[in-house]
Image (cartoon, grey):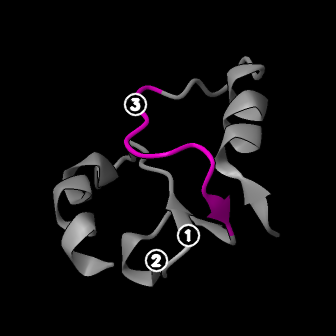
Amino acid sequence: MNQPLSTLISALASSDDCKPLAIDGATSRQISEIDLDSRRLHQGGLFIAIRGARFDSHQALGTLGSKL
């Protein structure tokens, strides 16, 4: 998968189940993968933070910039 982030944002925004809350960075970037686990994130990947029953992955957002 290699799509501009803007294309993925448009698809999410049109969904009733998911609405993007915050976008940090250029939306023209090419996205090579989508992952819900920040530990597996690689350069070019898109991390989607979700609030789960045991862990809120929004807590990992602050550390991701230094990881990549």
Dot 2 or dot 3: first in sequence order is: 3
User: On screen, 68 above or below 53?
Assistant: below
x 56%, y 72%: residue: 44
x 36%, y 47%: residue: 53
Answer whether residue 25 is magenta in the image: yes
The answer to whether marks 1 and 2 mark residues whose Cβ atoms lie closer than 8 Å is yes
User: On screen, 52 above or below 68?
Assistant: above
Residue 43, position as x, y percentages in the image: 49, 79
Q: Main secondary structure of the magenta part?
A: loop
Which of the numbered marks, if any, corresponds to residue 41?
A: 2
Q: Which residues are magenta?
A: 21-31
Q: Which residue is mark 3?
A: 22
**The C terminus sits in image quarter:** bottom left
The answer to whether marks 3 and 1 mark residues whose Cβ atoms lie closer than 8 Å is no
x 68%, y 39%: residue: 6
Residue 2, position as x, y percentages in the image: 79, 67
Question: Helix, strand or loop at disc 2?
Answer: loop
Closer to us: 53 or 34: 34
Question: Helix, strand or loop at disc 3?
Answer: loop
Q: Residues within 10 Å of mark 2 (few under 14, many from 20)?
A: some
Distance from disc 2 to disc 3, alpha carbons, whole Å, reads: 18 Å
The answer to whether marks 2 and 3 mark residues whose Cβ atoms lie closer than 8 Å is no
Residue 3, position as x, y percentages in the image: 78, 58
Residue 21, position as x, y percentages in the image: 43, 26
Which of the numbered marks, if any, corresponds to residue 67?
A: none
Query: Mark 3 belongs to which amino acid?
Result: Ala
Closer to us: 66 or 34: 66
Question: Helix, strand or loop at disc 1?
Answer: strand
Query: Mark 1 belongs to which amino acid?
Result: Gly
User: On screen, 49 above or below 66?
Assistant: above
Q: Which residue is mark 1?
A: 45
